[in-house]
Image: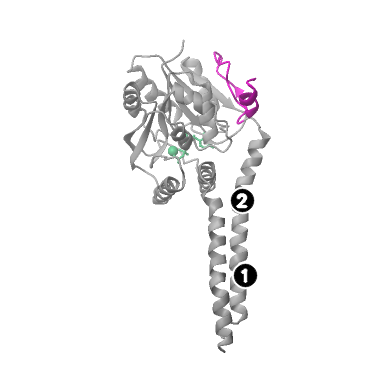
Amino acid sequence: MQPTFSIIAPIYNEIGNLPELYRRVRDVMDGLGEPWELVLVDDGSRDGSTDMIRQLAQQDSRVSPVIFARNFGHQIAVTAGLDYSQGKAVVIIDADLQDPPEVVPELIAKWREGFQVVYAVRTEREGETWFKTATASVFYRLIYRITDVKIPMDTGDFRLMDRKAVNVMNHMRERHRFLRGMSAWVGFRQVGVPYKRAARYTGETKYPLKKMLKFASDAITGFSYFPLQLATFLGFLSAGISIVGIPVAVVLRLAGHSQLTGQATTLISVLFLGGAQLICLGILGEYIGRVYDEVKGRPLYIVSEEPADFHQPELINSKESTSNGQN
Ligand code: UDP
Ligand code: MG
């Protein structure tokens, strides 16, 4: 039977949070009186979370375990959850209980009003370092300015999506995924619901600075050409400066002022331009590397165990299958 609601949680070493996550999701969802499922995607955990997921699935058949062959990253884990979910409305939630399951009924209420994407907006953040809060705030504002898709500020992946929107998302097989951008991109009727983001229940963040930077660059390259245009802008700027500079230097020289010479000036301008060029090359490289990844067309993830009752004929896991309609 098709559940009405699917709750998706990506799991990477969350053994301390799993029982509490299950308990709170169950209590909230049972209160709604409609069939639901909890899709737990194990993203290559090494702390025993995998066994705990299996155990939860054995106790309660509404728990759907999707177990990856290795760690593929948060956004990919959520993507697998979307692929394997069967509900009419699908909610993405973090496993560390920072997104309180108790907010889900509010999202569902908006869905019942006819919205296809209901995203939760963080009005407050508890228990996060000022560094995380500050960088996140700068990041969301930057993304908002430089992308064409208006990605709502201060939203995470905590959101509800209607089956229609999920099906569209499932056909977007890009590798470097920024799901909150993609879900804004699909359109439909969207609305935000404010909530207070809690502190992590137990454990530590799985997003060290390196992953945060990768996430930010995926978001920017996935939704904007601004960094590429920066090279053009810098080019025009330095060409402009030299167009003004050349006659100035000539006139000064003819007038007998030759203070403009000097090795330091030359060296500095060469280093500056060399640096600017290398940075632009690097930016170009970021895009080209991503193009290469897309062209390879590898599957987004490898599943080593999937839910026993899973049957979704049009499950699409590779670029191939979307382009020629085969699996
Ligand atoms: N996560 C994952 N794979 C990873 C990193 C994180 O599935 O490689 C999951 C993690 O278990 C959690 C969610 O993604 O459910 C969000 O991670 P986290 O809470 O560490 O991020 P933060 O809230 O600190 O940004
Ligand atoms: Mg978290």
Q: Kindly identify which residue carries mark 1.
A: 270
Main secondary structure type of the part rendered in magenta:
loop
Q: Residue at x 43, y 18 (%)?
A: 88
Closer to the camera in the image, 158 or 238: 238
Where residue 169 appears, as percent x and y from the top left, is: 50, 28
Above or below 310: residue 121: below
Verify whether residue 318 appears in magenta. yes
Disc 1 marks which amino acid? Val
Q: How is the image coloured?
A: one colour
Above or below 286: residue 247: below
Q: Residue at x 45, y 36 (%)?
A: 180
Above or below 148: residue 77: above
Q: Residues within 10 Å of mark 1 (few under 14, many from 20)?
A: few
Where residue 170 appears, as percent x and y from the top left, is: 53, 26
For residue 160, side relative to residue 244 (left or right): left
Question: Dots 2 and 1: beta carbons under 8 Å?
Answer: no
Give residue 284's mark.
2
Disc 2 marks which amino acid? Leu
What residue range appears in magenta? 300-327
Kindly tell me whether residue 81 is visible in this rendering: no
Q: Residue at x 45, y 46 (%)?
A: 143
Where residue 185 appears, as percent x and y from the top left, is: 46, 34
Q: Earlier in the sequence, mark 2 or mark 1?
A: 1
Element assignment for label 1: helix
